[in-house]
Amino acid sequence: MAPARDRRTGFSRRRQYSAFFGYVLAVAGAVVGAALLAASIFNPPAFSAARMAVASVTAPVASLLDSGTDAIASVPQAIGTWINVHGENAALRAELKRHDALLSKARVIAYDNRRLRGLLRVRDRTPEPVLTARLVASTASSGRRFALLNAGRVQGVTPGMPVLGPEGLVGRVLESGPIAARVLLITDPESLVPVRRTRDGLPAIAAGRGDGRVDIRSVGAANVRFAPGDMFVSSGIGGLYAPGVPVARVERAGSDSVVATPYAPPDAVDFVIVERPFMPMPPPLPPRAGPAVSPAAPAR
């Protein structure tokens, strides 16, 4: 059986040396601490100079250790950034190819438009703006969607005039007072706007839903497919809205009828432009005069 190890320092010279040097370091530390404490109390300038001298020695070491820590910590981030950049580059290249196809198609459409305009000598009619005004209120709690315009007949605003925001069509003037007008928004259930799809000219109707969005309904065709992001602008049919005014963008894919978001949501529009109708409405007919009645002959 092995003898038990004696834990007393007297039987191990190495333990004796370790204990001795430990006592020496403890005493030296206590002496240095007492000296520094005394210097900080009785001679603050000297203590400050000693402290800054020590800081001057330890600062480069701390800076080097900090730089090494940052370098080691940045390795995983650099690897992740490289992976993300590689994936983003692939996605951007694929998107560039899609944009090239769209750009080529747009160039073909633009060329066809110029050629047809030259053949038919078509000139666009630009509606004359009436004024710029502010939408001061709009309905949000009922099923109808109206807005109040702070301009009326005094400023030249009459019923039937289109109202446009910075991004697209807002609605049309429904009623006009002396200094205010009521605007029927395109999101109102009673609003119907003839539109066409920008990529192929497909005719459709933008009908208000009453919830801040519109329904895009196909006309003249069945099983029409709509894709997310399809853009619709006014077609000019009906003579009220000028052609080419942005109206709405399709949210989700569907057929025959889909939900779309207006380009100019009324709750995000402050100032609007009031324009004259694309084709002015004919003046009202004068009242028809009744048949002339000759005075009765006097009785004999």
Image (tube, rainbow, N blue to C red):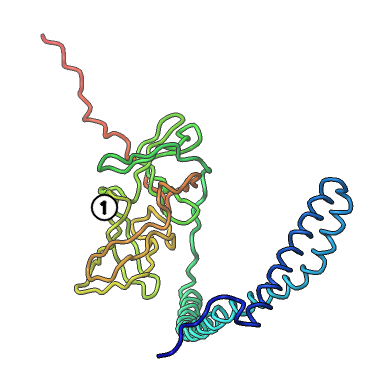
Residue occupied by mark 1 = 209
Amino acid type of the residue tagged 1 in the rendering:
Arg
Residue at the far left in the pictured view: 300
- Left or right: where 87 falls relative to 182: right
Q: Toward which corner of the image does residue 68 lie, by quadrant?
A: bottom right
Under circle 1, the secondary element is loop
**Residue 237 placed where, x, y %?**
34, 60
Compared to residue 254, the image places residue 209 above or below, namely above
The residue at the point 81 percent across, 58 percent down is 51
**Residue 94 placed where, x, y %?**
46, 85
Quadrant where the C terminus is found in the figure: top left
Quadrant where the N terminus is found in the figure: bottom left
**Residue 236 placed where, x, y %?**
38, 60
Residue at the far top in the pictured view: 300
The residue at the point 48 percent across, 74 percent down is 117
Compared to residue 60, the image places residue 182 above or below, namely above
